[in-house]
Amino acid sequence: QVQLVESGGGLVQAGGSLSLSCAASGRTFSGYFMTWFRQAPGKERDFVAAISWSYGTTYYADSVKGRFTISRDGAKNTVYLQMNSLKSEDTAVYYCAAKYSGAYSYSNPRGYSYWGQGTQVTVSS
């Protein structure tokens, strides 16, 4: 049974940094995309960043490019999201998700089979 467990959310002032972790278990993730999405109140779930587990290739939403960094540690089966220069508009629940390469783009939440429970990130201005 696949489990994704996020941690590291919290409250931070604008301009500050936070690091999120997603501990993955239950299978090997070779061939998978590991991705962070976020959802603000009353809004849709949006793509933030993705990483190819096998190749380490990374992808970012324009809104976070240059500020956020996604990475993975194969030995720990963990994906990270380092968030710098945080803005109030980054406030959301952040979700870790996993999918095998398939029909949907890595940025489309519909293609994801596995989800974590989410972790709240609040940026105060």
Image (cartoon, rainbow, N blue to C red):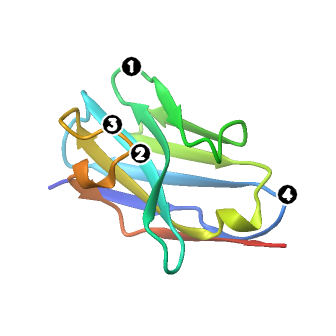
Given the image, on which type of amino acid does mark 3 rest?
Phe
- Circles 2 and 1 in contact, beta carbons < 8 Å: no
The reply, left or right, for residue 67 in relation to residue 13 is left
Q: Residue at x 48, y 73 (%)?
A: 43
Q: Which mark is residue 35?
A: 2
Q: Earlier in the sequence, mark 1 or mark 4?
A: 4
Mark 3–mark 1 distance (CA, rounded to whole Å):
10 Å
Q: Residues within 10 Å of mark 4 (few under 14, many from 20)?
A: some
Distance of label 2 from label 4 (alpha carbons) = 23 Å
Q: Which residue is mark 4?
A: 15
Would you say the residues marked 4 and 3 are in contact, meaning their CB atoms lie under 8 Å apart?
no
> Whole-percent x and y of residue 98?
30, 46
Whichever of labels 3 and 1 marks the residue nearer the N terminus, that label is 3
| Quadrant of the image containing the C terminus | bottom right
User: What element does badge 1 sit on?
Assistant: loop
Q: State the residue at coordinates (43%, 63%).
A: 45
Local crowd size for mark 3, using a 10 Å CA cut-off: few (<14), some (14–19), many (≥20): many
Nearest to N terminus: mark 2 or mark 1:
2
Gap in angstroms between the C-alphas marked 2 and 1: 14 Å
> Could you say which disc has been placed on residue 33 in the image?
3
Q: How many marks?
A: 4
Figure check: 25 above or below 119: above
- Give the labeled residue for mark 1: 55
Q: Position of residue 120 (x, y in %)?
A: 56, 72
Identify the residue at horizontal 27%, vertical 49% (top origin): 25
